[in-house]
Image (tube, rainbow, N blue to C red):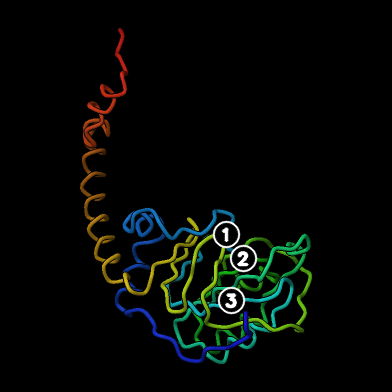
Amino acid sequence: MKARIIRNIARADVSAIAALGELGVATVHEAQGRTGLMQPYMRPTYAEARVAGSAITVLCPPGDNLMIHAAMEVCRAGDVLVVATMAESKHELSWGMFGDLLATSCRARGVAGLVIDAGVRDTADLHAMQFPVWSKTISAQGAVKANAGSVNMPIVCAGAHVDPGDVIIGDADGVVVVKRSTAVAVAKGGEERRAKEIRTRARLKAGELGIDIYGLRDKLAELGVEYEE
């Protein structure tokens, strides 16, 4: 792949991003047909972390954060950095490719958060800064700045395909990707799903059984389940 930096990308609708962020990862994942979820090993560095924004995609060699520094120049306020490595390495878990200095630069540029399929460091500082980060692992070993990669090209991060400008939502449940072209529709579907869940929750609190609310008695009969006293 040719090393390149794409300066200008299309971003998702701002109101759709806000709505998706309010809905959260689990509801958005369900609303778009249970797609777009990153691998469950992607965990926030602190429990309260939340983010929603358009993706600036970064592809780096393992243990090398040169392209993360390069990406800062093309970030706008509200963007989310999404970082993948070119290939897995037996040493990939040894490197903390992002720490408090890069987070300070992100804050200055208005970057909303980071999702990285590799390691990070300085997690206490990231928590103190309230800079939301989701990573594969944590390591104190710093990265080098020696090899080229790309910025704002399609990547695969933690098993999910991410195009520049896609919407990234992160919270305590993990990270989900919504395609830029479907963000408005998914936000609408998510809001409808949330309204339905509110009604269902009220019925469950009133004592109704999920087996009746969801019409599951017919499914049990179809599967040949028999009741005995």
Mark 1 lies on a secondary structure that is loop
Do callouts 2 and 3 mark residues in contact (Cβ within 8 Å)? no
Q: Quadrant of residue 81?
A: bottom right
In the picture provided, is 189 more to the left or to the right than 7? left
Q: Quadrant of the C terminus?
A: top left
Q: Quadrant of the N terminus?
A: bottom right
What's the amino acid at mark 3?
Met
Mark 2 lies on a secondary structure that is strand
Do callouts 2 and 1 mark residues in contact (Cβ within 8 Å)? yes
Where does the image place residue 182, in percent across and percent down from the top left? 31, 70
Closer mark to the observer between disc 2 and disc 1? 2
Mark 2, residues whose alpha carbon is within 10 Å: few (<14), some, or many (≥20)?
A: many
Residue picked out by circle 1: 42
Which residue is farthest top? Answer: 229
Do callouts 1 and 3 mark residues in contact (Cβ within 8 Å)? no
Above or below for 69 versus 127: below
Residue picked out by circle 2: 117
Which residue is farthest front? Answer: 1
Where does the image place residue 215, in percent across and percent down from the top left? 21, 33
Residue picked out by circle 3: 129
Mark 2 and mark 3 lie on one chain; the one further toward the N terminus is 2
Mark 3, residues whose alpha carbon is within 10 Å: few (<14), some, or many (≥20)?
A: few
Mark 3 lies on a secondary structure that is helix
Residue at horizontal 52%, vertical 90%?
A: 74
In the picture provided, is 22 more to the left or to the right than 172? left
Closer mark to the observer between disc 2 and disc 3? 2
- As measured in the structure, the alpha-carbon distance from the residue carrying label 2 to the one carrying label 1 is 7 Å
- As measured in the structure, the alpha-carbon distance from the residue carrying label 1 to the one carrying label 3 is 20 Å
What's the amino acid at mark 2?
Asp
